[in-house]
Amino acid sequence: MTTSPKAMPLSRRRFLTLSGQSALFAGAALGACSLWPRWAIAEPDLAGGLLRLGRDIYPHDAIADTYYLTPLEPLLENNRSLIADGLADLDRRAHEAHGRRYAKIEQEADRAALLREIEDGDFFQTVRGTLVVGLYDNAALWEPHFGYEGSSWQQGGYLHRGFDDLVIDWL
């Protein structure tokens, strides 16, 4: 006769095994969530739409999600209604044209067509303007992703270092 795992007495060995498994699963869950800022984890629909929008405006596959989402946090604090209403309008347009939310449209050309419809509006311009600074003024992204080594005068200028020594060849 076998006893079920729940009926087994909780020995020290079993306690350590169960607690180790729990810690492993909790660590994996927290690790996945740490890729997004705290506000984005609390509002995944809003974050998913803004992330898709940001990646469509400034497409860099190698840049982590957090670099797109973190600069948008002040927008949500100061202009929440503009952002929420703008994303709802974009989702409405996407649903009318493609039967799904903007972030769920697979074809890049279809998403680009929707963005062309709203590109002159306050919502699009606010997100675009915030992300251009948030992405390209982030020193952590300069050299590894864009090949920019930083300000030249702090490193002695370009005269003796070379003016055409970009680290990557995307230009």
Image (tube, rainbow, N blue to C red):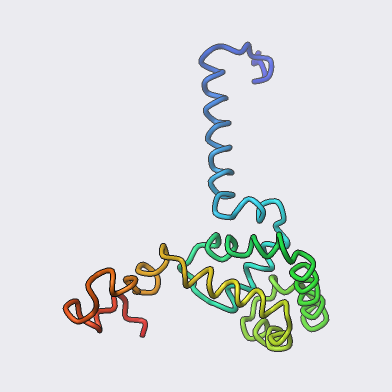
Determine the image quadrant of residue 71: bottom right
Image point (69%, 75%), residue name = 105
The structure residue drawn at horizontal position 16% and vertical position 78%, both measured from the top left corner, is 160
- Asked whether, in this view, residue 71 is left or right of residue 156, the answer is right
Q: Measuring from the top left, give residue 125's x and y in whole percent.
A: 66, 80
Q: In this view, does 138 lie to the left or right of 110?
A: left
* Front residue (pair 151, 171): 151
Percent from the top left, x then y, of residue 122?
Answer: 73, 80
Q: Is residue 110 above or below residue 54?
A: below
Vertical order, 30 against 88 (above or below): above
Quadrant in which the N terminus is drawn: top right
Vertical side of 58 occupied by 8: above or below = above
Where, by quadrant of the figure, is residue 8 drawn?
top right
Residue 36 image-quadrant placement: bottom right
Residue 61 at x, y percent in the picture: 49, 71
Q: For this rendering, which residue is in front, 137 or 63? A: 137
As rendered, which of 58 and 142 lies closer to the eye? 142
How many labels sit on residues?
Answer: 0
Residue occupying image coordinates x 24% and y 83%:
163
Residue placed farthest to the left in the image? 160
The x, y position of residue 67, in whole percent, is 52, 63
Location of the C terminus by quadrant is: bottom left
Q: Is residue 121 left or right of residue 74?
A: right
